[in-house]
Image (tube, rainbow, N blue to C red):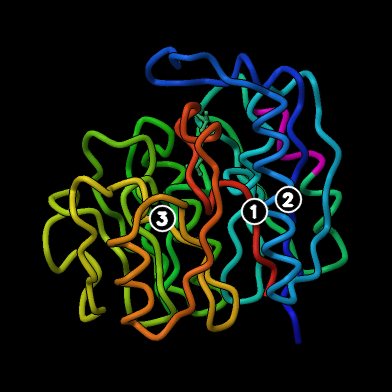
Amino acid sequence: MPPTVLVRAVPSSFARALAAAPPEPPIDVARARAQHAGYVAALRRLGADVVELPADEACPDCVFVEDTAVIAGGLGLITRPGAASRQAEPAAVRAALAGRLPLEEVAAPATIDGGDCLRLGRRLYVGRTARTNAAGAARAREVFARVGVEVIEVPVDGALHLKSVCSPLGDDAVLVAEGALPPGTFGGARELIVPADEAPAANVVVIGRAALVAAGFPGAARLVAEAGFEPVPVDTAEMRKADGALTCLSIVVP
Ligand code: CIR
């Protein structure tokens, strides 16, 4: 069965998306839209059933739909994002996921972003960052324990999200940017180290035996190929200006 993949369109307000450093040159919304279209086209070519939600101009970061829901063990946790400006984003995603799988919620003061959640089989690694607090991680632990998924917290330093520096490649391997996390962070999983000069490409989206990889990072593409996945380069340079990687742009509904 092809996976359903939820994405969300780029609003004009994306020019004002959150960014750790003011992008220079500034975000080009037209280019971001073209890159987003390329990402969606690549997903469709790989057989995904893509559902595209309309943009919300009141939510400059809404294209980063990953942060609004976490799915594991057949259950969806609708998040409460750690950035106040993003807390209106999950409502549309909740509506889109309703009826597809059982959903749970996160209540204040807990915050958690999907970009901090990395699933490997029955384990969900939850990064503790400025966006995901102790109560958010505890809520994930409580909810996913009900479906036999164990939550393991990971302290994250110097990155926006856990998955800003790593991502799963199947159920037993992880791509990790060199020096970003202590070796062994993911238990017995194989850690494939992406050289520091290609760190942004440690974040890939796996669809079947293929993986979307940020264009322009040949070392990461090679690692993906050596691990038995077909690397599919996609250009998302405008998203990187707002600290977004590839997984940030979608929610894969198994
Ligand atoms: C933010 O700061 O929230 C957005 N500009 C970037 C979010 C990236 N999302 C992700 O890593 N999952």
Question: Going 41% across and 74% down the picture, which residue do you hit?
Answer: 169
Residue that carries the numbered disc 3 in the rendered image: 203
CA distance separating discs 2 and 1? 5 Å
Q: Disc 3, ligand 1: is the CB inside 8 Å? A: yes
Instruction: Give the class, few, some or many, for how many residues have Cα within 10 Å of label 2's Cα (few <14, many ≥20).
Output: many
Q: Is 139 situated above or below 173?
A: above
Say whether residue 179 is left or right of residue 201. left
Is 215 magenta? The answer is no
Q: Earlier in the sequence, mark 2 or mark 1?
A: 2
Amino acid type of the residue that numbered disc 2 sits on in the rendered structure: Val
137 or 247, which lies in front? 247
Specify few, some or many for label 1: CA neighbours under 10 Å numbering under 14, 14-19, or 20 or more: many
Q: Residue at x 52, y 25 (%)?
A: 83
Tell me the amino acid under the disc marked 3.
Answer: Asn
Quadrant of residue 24 within the rendered picture: top left
Q: Give the CA distance from mark 3 to mark 1.
A: 12 Å
Judging by the rendered image, the residue that carries numbered circle 2 is 7
Q: Position of residue 215 (x, y in %)?
A: 46, 52
| Element class at badge 3 | loop
241 left or right of 186 in image: right
User: Foreground residue, 118 or 176?
Assistant: 176
What x and y, as percent, mark residue 232? Answer: 53, 66
x%, y% of residue 214? 46, 52
Determine the CA span between mark 2 and mark 3: 17 Å
Q: Give the quarter of the figure containing the C terminus.
A: bottom right
Does residue 247 sit above or below 61 in this rendering? below
Q: Earlier in the sequence, mark 2 or mark 3?
A: 2
